[in-house]
Image: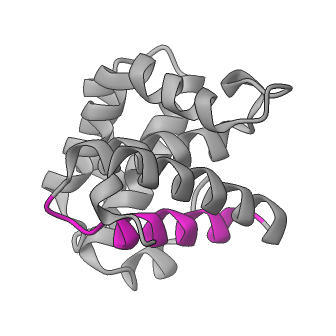
C-alpha cells in the first residue's frame, strides 16, 4: 500500500498527511508495533517533506485512540450482512481516518474531508469501491454533522 516517491512529492500538505495517516492505520493492523512507533517511522522515513505533520499525527493517533467508536459508526452505515472486519483493510483504513476527521476536525468543512478521503480511495480502488467509500462517508457526515447536511 505505497505510492511512489514522485507521486507523493506532488501531493499538497493535507493530501500527503491524509494518505500517510491511512497508510499508518493500514500498517497498524498488519504490524505488532505501537501506533507511536509507526508514526515515528513515518515522520523519520516515509512522510514527504511537504506533508502536514500535525494533521498526520492527529489523525493517526486519533484513529488508534477512537477506534471502537469509529468502528461503531462504520457498522451503523453498513448493510446488515457486512461487518467492519469484512471490509478490505485499505478501505477500512480510509473510512476510519475519514470518520475520525469528521468527528474531530469540525473547523474543516465536512464536504472537503469527504472528498479528500474519496480521492484517497480512488488512488487505490476502482469505481465500485470508491463509490462505496463515498456512500459510507456521506451517510456518516450527515449523521455526525447534521448542521452541514444539505436539504
Closest to the observer, 47 or 28: 28
Residue segment shown in magenta? 107-125
| Residue at the image point whose x is 65% and y is 58% from the top | 135
Looking at the image, which residue sits at the far bottom?
Answer: 10
| Residue at the image point whose x is 46% and y is 36% from the top | 25
| Residue at the image point whose x is 49% and y is 47% from the top | 140
Q: Where is residue 103 shown, x and y percent of the image?
A: 29, 42
Q: How is the image coloured?
A: one colour
Closest to the observer, 105 or 144: 144
- Residue 93: in magenta span: no
Q: Where is residue 112 shown, x and y percent of the image?
A: 36, 73
Relative placement, left or right, of 96 versus 131 is left
- Residue 121: in magenta span: yes
Indicate whether 88 appears above or below 13.
Answer: above
| Residue at the image point whose x is 33% and y is 24% from the top | 66
Image quadrant in which you'd find residue 131: bottom right
Image quadrant in which you'd find residue 143: top left
Across the whole image, how many numbered discs are drawn on residues?
Answer: 0
State whether the magenta stretch is mostly helix, strand or loop: helix
Q: Where is residue 36 shown, x and y percent of the image?
A: 25, 26
Q: Quadrant of the C terminus?
A: bottom left
Closest to the observer, 150 or 71: 150
Relative placement, left or right, of 35 versus 19 is left
Amino acid at each position: 500500500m505505497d505510492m511512489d516517491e514522485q507521486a507523493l512529492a506532488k501531493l499538497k500538505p493535507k493530501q500527503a498527511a491524509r494518505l500517510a495517516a491511512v497508510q499508518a492505520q493500514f500498517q497498524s493492523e498488519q504490524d505488532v508495533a505501537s501506533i507511536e512507533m509507526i508514526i515515528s517511522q513515518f515522520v523519520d522515513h516515509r512522510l514527504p517533506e511537504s506533508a502536514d505533520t500535525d494533521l498526520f499525527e492527529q489523525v493517526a493517533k486519533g484513529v488508534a485512540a477512537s477506534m471502537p467508536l469509529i468502528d461503531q459508526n462504520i457498522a451503523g452505515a453498513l448493510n446488515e450482512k457486512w461487518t467492519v472486519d469484512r471490509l478490505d483493510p485499505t478501505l477500512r483504513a480510509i473510512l476510519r481516518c475519514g470518520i475520525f476527521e469528521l468527528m474531530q476536525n469540525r473547523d474543516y468543512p465536512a464536504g472537503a474531508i469527504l472528498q479528500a478521503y474519496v480521492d484517497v480511495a480512488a488512488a487505490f480502488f476502482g469505481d465500485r469501491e470508491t463509490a462505496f467509500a463515498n456512500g459510507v462517508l456521506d451517510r456518516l457526515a450527515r449523521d455526525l454533522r447534521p448542521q452541514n447536511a444539505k436539504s
